[in-house]
Amino acid sequence: MGAKQENGDPEDILPPLEQELSHDLDMKVKKYLRGEGADLEVLKDKKLKGQLYTRENLYGTSAKTAAKTEKWLLPSAGGYLEAEGIEKTWRIKQDTIGREVDISSAKNQYDIVLPDFGPYTLDFTSSGRYMAAAGRKGHLAVVDMKNMSLIKEIQVRETVRDVVFLHNEMFFAVAQKKYPYIYNRDGVELHCLKEHGAVTRLQFLKNHFLLASINKYGQLRYQDVTMGEMIGNFRTGLGRTDVMQANPFNGVVALGHSGGTVSMWKPTSAVPLVKMLCHPGPITAMAFHPDGHLMATSGKERKIKIWDVRKFEVLQTIRGHAKTLDFSQKGLLAAGTGSFVQIFGDFSGSRNYSRYMGHSIVKGYQIRKVAFRPYEDVLGIGHSMGWSSILIPGSGEPNFDTWLANPFETTKQRREKEIHSLLDKLPPETIMLDPSKIGTVKSGKKKEKPTKKEMEADLETAVEAAKGTAMKKKTKGRNKPSKIAVKKKEIVERAKKPFLDQQMVEEEKVAKKKRKIGEEIALPTALQRFARQKATA
């Protein structure tokens, strides 16, 4: 009971099970192939044909490797809520989900009520193992989400606006009333970053080890946390803002302003890379998709817009208001406002988001921050009375790579990873809109025209060189001073000629351009008789 392959060899007869596995592998290979292969038969250049043949083989090998990795090393698959008949997924309550899931998942449904210190903002480590919670009235806490145990909590006794983990769970930065501070996991204050001022939002770029902050005066700062060096200090000129998000794909920091514009910055440029008008009113929230190609923004006019960052155009507009936005690892979008959270999902793969789930917390609670927990189907909600955690099926990546983020890493593994990440730290110059350009050959620029000062300097240099030309000593009667002076004058004039010719050409171009512009300007009827008449043949 087997099938014979085309070559007909008895050794190549495959059992039915292996045939099915081979078919599945071929389907996965097609998913990873980079389109149709090049037609090499039509090429006459042998060298180019050989290079393309090698490239195609490399693409095929990488696609097979990726397919095998997905099949054998990534066995877990994410699942979403599925409705039957006329049932809607957004009507399914958390109580219903909690009764159907296993015990370990049910532990992720809880409410922490701390009415004296809210509202709270949250941040998770890249592995999802630890969470930092910061109350507006000075309460800071670090929680181990795996064991559901409190590691440390402190009271700083002043206003806290934001909190963010640094490269691992050992350090976190807090934006307090006057300055941002850096604490270690035990709650010990390590640094006070007075240069940043009264910061409203913080972001950490883990691949570059840069802490980015925006203060209440609209100043954007980048500081290298490894050496303490201030990499960039820019005045945005667009007023105070409390909307700030970093693109995980390229490290570009985006700011949402009160005029409805979104500006994108990098630490090596004093002017924004992009300034785009997204909403007619103030920006209230912003989030980036994990692949870096989509951006979601929310405005005061009660609209959520999905943008394609590669083309800077709107893909979809969703009616609704959001004070906080966040994308999950699998692309689900959470929008929170008031005491209600909505989850949107792109299930067709066409970048068209529709309602997936909804959740209402206690009436009167005001949501400040929503954040998906990595590698778990969990959404954290920070609100005015503490923080909550709900289950969102299909939001987290089911398979984690221990080289990137290991929720179960030991102390030794954490130390090794910290050293490797420091050795692989990217310089600030690698932050750009299209990081795929790194490593490619830079295209040659057009030769720029020299300025007037540069032309005058070149002319003076040429004249001095001509004057210093040594004259040959000739026979008697041909070596008179008058003849030598005439010769030197001719050499100087010859040196000046190319520069004067170029100057005349430039002047003619400018005059021609002015004449053309003057002709294009339409004169009133009363003055048309004075217009320059074109020469007739």
Image (cartoon, grey):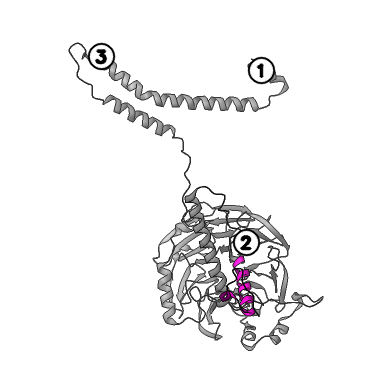
Q: Residue at x 62, y 73 (%)?
A: 4
Q: Position of residue 390 (x, y in %)?
A: 66, 79
What crowding class fits label 1: few (fewer than 14 Cα within 10 Å), some (14-19), or many (20 or more)?
A: few
- The disc at residue 530 is 1
Are circles 2 and 1 on residues that touch, CB within 8 Å?
Answer: no
Are circles 1 and 3 on residues that touch, CB within 8 Å?
Answer: no
Q: Is residue 201 visible?
A: no
Q: Is residue 512 visible?
A: yes
To which residue does mark 3 refer?
Answer: 483
472 with respect to 499 (left or right): left
Q: Residue at x 57, y 70 (%)?
A: 67
Of residues 472 and 267, which is closer to you in this image?
472
For the N terminus, the quadrant is bottom right
Q: Position of residue 326 (x, y in %)?
A: 62, 69
- The disc at residue 395 is none
Q: Residue at x 35, y 25 (%)?
A: 495
Q: Position of residue 474 (x, y in %)?
A: 20, 16
Secondary structure under tag 3 reads: helix
489 with respect to 444 (left or right): left
Closer to the eye: label 2 or 1: 2
Amino acid type shown at disc 1:
Phe
Amino acid type shown at disc 2:
Leu
Of residues 182 and 495, which is closer to you in this image?
495
Amino acid type shown at disc 3:
Lys
Closer to the chain start, of discs 1 and 3, is: 3
